[in-house]
Image (tube, helix red, strand yellow):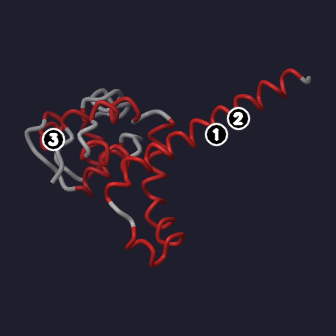
Amino acid sequence: MLSLARVGHGPRIGSALKPKHQIANEVGIHRETMLKVMRGERAISIDRAVRFLEVCSVSPHAIIVLTLAGEEVLACEWMHREMGEFLDEFIISLPGQLDRTLGRRVDYLRPRWATGTSQLVAKLLSRHIDDLANRDIAMSLTR
């Protein structure tokens, strides 16, 4: 079971674009139950949490993983930004990519490598963004 109390009050969820009764109806729970979930008085299943976040037009997998990792502040900051969408796609595609790329070598991975690997990925993304920005600048200067 998952508590969405801090995330449930994030931007545009606590004051969602849809009325709360409509969100509850689309999620398949009673409005009062949804309000209890949002206040942290009741936990919901992961499946319901995914549906709740989808109905609120939020990247559900990223938000749930961030919440489970104790990063509710980032979850609230990223839920309606492209970073949330990026992380959602990354989380969904990473296991399959690791399986296809590593195959049987997956058994050689060590948990202590996770932090360093996440730093490498962040640096790679940073360089990629810088390269794109530099190309845009170079293109605009040649016009």
- Residue 45 locus on image (x, y percent): 19, 56
- Residue 132 is marked as 2
Give the amino acid at mark 2.
Leu
Depth check, front residue: 55 or 81: 81
- For the residue marked with disc 1, what is the amino acid? His
Mark 1–mark 2 distance (CA, rounded to whole Å): 6 Å
Element under disc 2: helix
The answer to whether 99 is drawn above or below residue 75 in the figure is below
The residue at 77%/29% (across/down) is: 136
Q: Please state which of the two labelled residues, at mark 1 or mark 3, is closer to the viewer.
A: 1
Q: Earlier in the sequence, mark 1 or mark 3?
A: 3
What mark, if any, has residue 128 been given in the picture?
Answer: 1
At x 40%, y 41%, the residue is 58
Q: Tell how many labels.
A: 3
Image quadrant in which the N terminus is located:
bottom left
What is the x, y in percent for residue 63?
Answer: 34, 43
